[in-house]
Image (tube, rainbow, N blue to C red):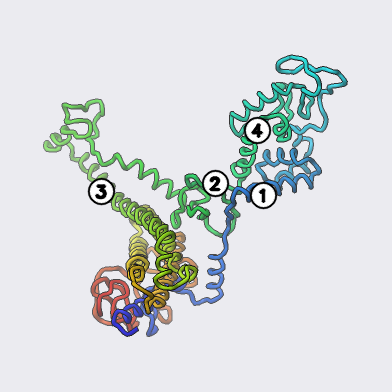
Amino acid sequence: MDSEDDMHDANDAESLDDYYSGDTAGEYSDDDDGGVFEFMDNDSDDSDDIIASRQQKNYMVLKEADIHQHQEDDITTVSTVLSISRVAASILLRHFHWSVSNVHEAWFADEDRVRETVGLLERPVLELGNAKEISCGICFESYPLDRISAAACGHPFCSACWRAYMSTSIDGGPGCLVLRCPDPSCNATVGQDMINLLASDDDKAKYARYLLRSYIEDNRKTKWCPAPGCEYAIEFVAGSGGYDVSCLCSYGFCWNCTEEAHRPVDCGTVAKWIMKNSAESENMNWLCLGAWSDHGERTGGFYACNRYEAAKQEGAYDETERRREMAKNSLERYTHYYERWATNQSSRQKALADLHQMQTVYLERISDKQSQPESQLKFIIEAWLQIVECRRVLKWTYAYGYYLPEHEHAKRQFFEYLQGEAEAGLERLHQCAEKDLQGYLNAEGPSNDFNDFRTKLAGLTSVTRNYFENLVRALENGLSDVDSQGACSKAASSKNGVTSKGKGGRSKGACRTTSGSSKNLDDSGGWSCDQCTYLNVRSAITCAMCHQRR
């Protein structure tokens, strides 16, 4: 790299890598090449554990064929272990929410009670005998035996009445899966074998569909992906991982509350935030706090009260005015966070659209112009996927910030610093993936520095991912390493916290704010940018954050 811009990029990459690298405590270093506030982890074993945890998933995405296979496997297991028919095994599994272990436990504890509860009879309660004709229990017409059918209980009904009975039940929804004998006094269950024997083709298809869906909807370990039009399901395995899952349709959601994925905030905060978003929409209209029935055209309208303005001039609303001012300030604070929450949501949607266009249009064009196989351009897609994920995280950090207690000044100050650094790092990645890439997209032929661009974008993607993962862990941990006095804890061994320390563990000032600047070297050897106050490494000639020259 011969040009000044190339030197700039090299310094940027070095500084950013120093800042974003690592996994646990943030610290100031006195080493010559340190000096940047960063998340650090010097335990290689722990680093390996974290990398391994990122590769492990505590859930599995199921396609329809997978669901059917899992269902059949469970039916086979129960049928084999209990020595019962597959139809009976299916009935038991539906009753016990498709839990094989619960079926086995209940069956071996009290088989008779289980049979009575689910309607699995061991012997018929009514014998048809050798009569040539049998009277149907519904229409009371006599039919030959070949036109009479009965469940395990033996109560006889003609094929036409059975078909009508089944059709009505199936049209009523999934309740048909617990269909019982038409005889009011009988508890015998009607299994899928009778449905397949007597119901119409349409009803058989509906029943089979209900049965398949029940495996997901009645199973405590599985849920449908809530994305519109998606037919995939998620099987979740409880473990140490979080609740965020990602479907094959690219939609991410929280397993626990089924809202969109929302780390680092918890489900309770999301519920409060969504409710507040819907409630605050009407609070832009300020009333006089008088009775609604007293308002109308003569008062200036229901939403434009001139009574209040007149009373205010007379000094009659001093206390009310104070309350209104407090409410107004509260709304302005909410609006500040909501607008930024919504802006990041819009940016994420735009990034998703750009990702789709990159996958369907631009990637092939870059492949042709740069003479690179598409398999070698995955780093571009990975960068855009990371941008989408980071926009989601940033969006929810504003909900986190809104509910962060006002009196915890140290945590709030540190949170805003981390959030600002995250936004700046993401903007750098976004600019590289969008604007810098445009030059190679419009090039007439292969570019000599395309491999340098590959290295830069892949590096930015990696360090941004690391920073955001650490940011999420720190916020989920409640910024616990920031003590009540406004300093950062010295417990550098904490996995999720952030600390600030130098050699020998001495404190170097807790959560560095973004105000003030200095042209002097920091005692670690780094220098603070006059424009953005970012603490750069000593060797950098331009600011890694805002590109201001030293």
* Residue appearing at x 74%, y 29% in the figure: 188
Spatial CA span between label 3 and label 4: 64 Å
- Compare marks 1 and 4 and give the one earlier in the sequence: 1
Instruction: Say left or right for 194 vs 243.
Output: right
Contact check, label 3 and label 4, Cβ < 8 Å: no
Q: Which residue is mark 1?
A: 70
- Compare marks 2 and 1 and give the one earlier in the sequence: 1
Label 1 vs label 3, nearer the camera: 1
Q: Which disc is residue 329 wearing?
A: 3
Spatial CA span between label 2 and label 1: 16 Å
Does residue 236 appear anywhere in the picture? yes
The spot of residue 236 in percent (x, y) is: 58, 53
Quick one: SS at disc 3? helix
Q: Which residue is mark 4?
A: 201
The one nearer the camera, 268 or 204, is: 204
Q: Which residue is mark 2?
A: 231
- Compare marks 4 and 2 and give the one earlier in the sequence: 4
- Name the residue type under label 3: Asn
- Compare marks 3 and 4 and give the one earlier in the sequence: 4
User: Which of the 4 image quadrants contains residue 122?
Assistant: top right
Quick one: SS at disc 4? helix
- Compare marks 1 and 3 and give the one earlier in the sequence: 1
Q: Residue furthest right?
A: 130
Q: Which quadrant holds the N terminus?
A: bottom left
- Name the residue type under label 4: Asp
